[in-house]
Amino acid sequence: MSEAQQSFSLLPGPWELGIWSQGSLPLLPLRQYDFALQSPSMTFPKWLSHPVPSEQPAPLHEGLPDPSRISSEVQQMWALTEMIRASHSSTRIGRFDDVLRRTPLYDFHLAHGGKMVAFAGWSLPVQYRDSHIDSHLHTRQLCSLFDVSHMLQTKIYGRDRVKLMESLVVGDIAELRPNQGTLSLFTNEAGGILDDLIVTNTSEGHLYVVSNASCWDKDLVLMQDKVRELQNMGSDVGLEVMDNALLALQGPTAAQVLQAGVTDDLRKLPFMTSAVMEVFGVSSCRVTRCGYTGEDGVEISVPAAGAVRLATALLENSEVKLAGLAARDSLRLEAGLCLYGNDIDEHTTPVEGSLSWTLGKRRRAAMDFPGAAVIVPQLKGKVQRRRVGLTCEGAPMRAHSPILSTEGTVIGTVTSGCPSPCLKKNVAMGYVPSEYSRPGTQLLVEVRRKQQMAVVSKMPFVPTNYYTLK
């Protein structure tokens, strides 16, 4: 993530962020914000939720200081800045006057010191009382609890549920065993990725689908239109939007913490499988062994009425701490996981995005998924560009930073980047021509009009710790 205003040379000024120092300008009453936003001397982004107080900016300098010397307020601004820079994606920050959805845990977040921001149309915590760095490292060492209830959860039911899903995604849904899930992709006829999602074949006779909040509307329309199309052809299929909350417990001790509240043996629940169980007294919870951090962990789909009770019970264990959007983003980047809208989009094919493994073998042979005529030939041919990992010293790489050859020719663009709290160096993803995609290739990146060396690196940057049966 990027640091706060003028604390790092790569950042915009406080007015570009809509952040000011308490000592330099008084806070305005809410009714005066519209005037401030329209003032020619105060150029706030239109989508900024609201100005927040911060500390005085540090002197201008290059590079990243020791995280232990950065105050929590500055780290909050660091996290917010990176989200603002990715405003075209799912991390879009909304204006204060937007109507934001609230998860069932909204009041719970406020009571626990959650610093709320607008994210993909929802009000969610970017961090809590702990700093972003502390939350990140705690997740790697013990476990953290994330509210991901903004994700779209749907049930696809009926005899033709697999037929419907396979008409939209690249994966082999028919081969999934009961309660097994897979990461898959919605694609269009041009081969572009419409969204990434997890599809689980439940033993209760439906498909459980989780997709991104930033794509909520278009994903729902896509699935509903296909349901109507198949129903008009006589197929037995239907769709239900779930109103459950979704909690992610992530980290090496997550299973141990959760085991105290369930009777099921979690040792028998490997990565990408799920089961319905009672969790700390809350019934009808679907526990799925997956996550977005690279660590072992679970996502728990819980009836909305029981979400606060479950979160409270989990926090009674001293190893569990709350974590927000900032830590979630840096954790997923260390794990080499894509953020839709940044690292993959409708103009990226699965092969270009280094996601060929999501294509089911049967589906490749049948070429019966949207965009197959474009995607399948890319598997054997040479694509023009590929998503790669990058590491560098110096100023952190960020989204939209140009990638150059060592001769100084622009060859690509960074799509996500941040300083890695675990590796103590900068990591990023981006797209480069295939001939530059080999790990170890020396490149240049341009940050704030200054070029610095970068190296193409294997992903994940930090080894993943998914739980698989031995």
Image (spheres, rainbow, N blue to C red):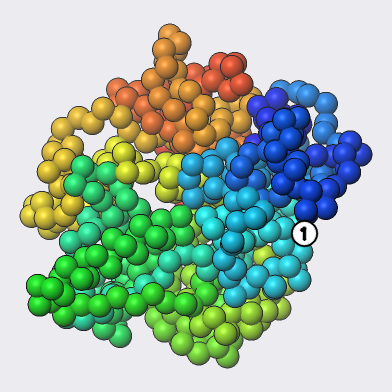
Left or right of residue 373: residue 345: right
Q: Quadrant of the C terminus?
A: bottom left
Point out the residue furthest to the right here. 23
**Occupied quadrant, residue 253:** bottom right
- Looking at the rendered structure, the secondary structure element under dot 1 is loop
Q: Residues within 10 Å of mark 1 (few under 14, many from 20)?
A: some
Q: Quadrant of the N terminus?
A: top right
From the top left corner, tell me how far across and down residue 127 is, in percent: 69, 56
**Mark 1 = which residue?**
129
Taking depth in this image into account, of 85 and 270 the one nearest to the observer is 85
Query: Is residue 456 toward the left or the right of residue 314 in the image?
Result: left
Note whether 396 is above or below 445 in the view shown. Answer: below
Count of numbered circles on the image? 1
Side of 3 where 284 appears, left or right: left
Residue 295 position in % (x across, y down): 51, 59
Residue drawn at x 22%, y 59% is: 168
In depth, the one of 335 and 195 nearer the eye is: 195
Q: Is residue 184 visible?
A: yes
Instruction: Examine the rendering and report whether any part of residue 197 can be seen.
Output: no
Question: In percent of the image, x 65 and y 27: which residue is there?
Answer: 10
Residue 173 placement (x, y as % from top left): 22, 66
**Residue drawn at point x = 66 percent, y = 50 percent:** 49
